[in-house]
Image: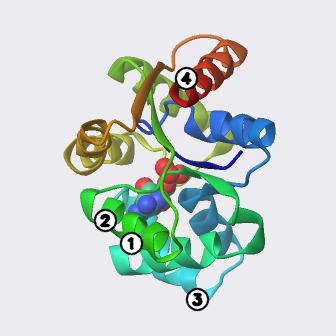
Amino acid sequence: MSSRLVLLGPPGAGKGTQAARLAERLGVPAVSTGDIFRSNIKNGTELGKRVQDITASGALVPDELTNELVRDRLAQADAVEGFLLDGYPRNVAQVAALDEMLAVAGRELDLAIELTVDPQVVVDRLTRRAEIEGRADDTEDVIRHRLDVYAEQTAPISQVYAARGLLAQVDGLGDVDDVTARLLAALSGARS
Ligand code: AMP
């Protein structure tokens, strides 16, 4: 069964953790634009140099660059039968870019799943993650900026997918295993 999925939710909702678990269960690659940017920065690539300051500030990397990256990634053999996107699309223009990528390949998105969490919980989680992982964009000011960017640019995406009947919302609070179980239930509910 093909699975072309998007995982939505604010920074700190647990998207990365859940995307990895879900992708493994479904046998599709988890594609995280944030992870791709971070690994390029770590390895000092040209792309990494271009996006380093932008990601550190909590702003979005320009759409042309991000869309191209996702286009290339989704064209790889392991993503032909399905994928789980984490952190993309991030604004309405990226939704349109993804639509076009899929249309060109004669494919359609199966579902967008939104992990919902209380905003205060998100701030607490991100502050804790900053202490554990030391991510450059997990400082207090940048966290606030990332949440603003999310509210302004990313949150509206949910309505776009909801209008197409493609949105499932899942409570992202609680035990990691419970959240994974809820996500899988939402997925099978959408397919039945
Ligand atoms: P994330 O790990 O998804 O929170 O992403 C970390 C940072 O990478 C974001 O704050 C952005 O600067 C950048 N980024 C990740 N995904 C995207 C995207 N789809 N569009 C633009 N910038 C992105």
Q: Amino acid at mark 3?
A: Glu
Label 1 with label 2: CB-CB less than 8 Å:
yes
Q: Amino acid at mark 1?
A: Glu
Q: Position of residue 108 (x, y in %)?
A: 48, 57
Q: Which residue is mark 2?
A: 96
Image quarter for ligand 1 equals bottom left
Q: CA distance from mark 4 to mark 2?
A: 24 Å
Q: In the rendered view, tell whether residue 157 sits above or below residue 88.
A: above
> The N terminus lies in which quarter of the figure?
top right
Q: Which residue is mark 1?
A: 100
**First of labels 3, 1 by sequence position:** 3
**First of labels 3, 4 by sequence position:** 3
Disc 1 packing (10 Å; few <14; some 14–19; many ≥20): some
Q: Position of residue 127 (x, y in %)?
A: 50, 31
Q: Amino acid at mark 2?
A: Ala
Q: Which residue is mark 4?
A: 186
Mark 3 and ligand 1: say if the CB distance to the nearest ligand atom is below 8 Å: no
* Left or right of 29, for residue 74: left
Q: CA distance from mark 2 to mark 3?
A: 26 Å
Q: Secondary structure at mark 3?
A: helix
Q: Residue furthest bottom?
A: 46
Image point (37%, 17%), residue name: 118
Q: CA distance from mark 1 to mark 2?
A: 6 Å
Q: Which residue is mark 3?
A: 46
**First of labels 2, 3 by sequence position:** 3
* Left or right of 127, for residue 134: right
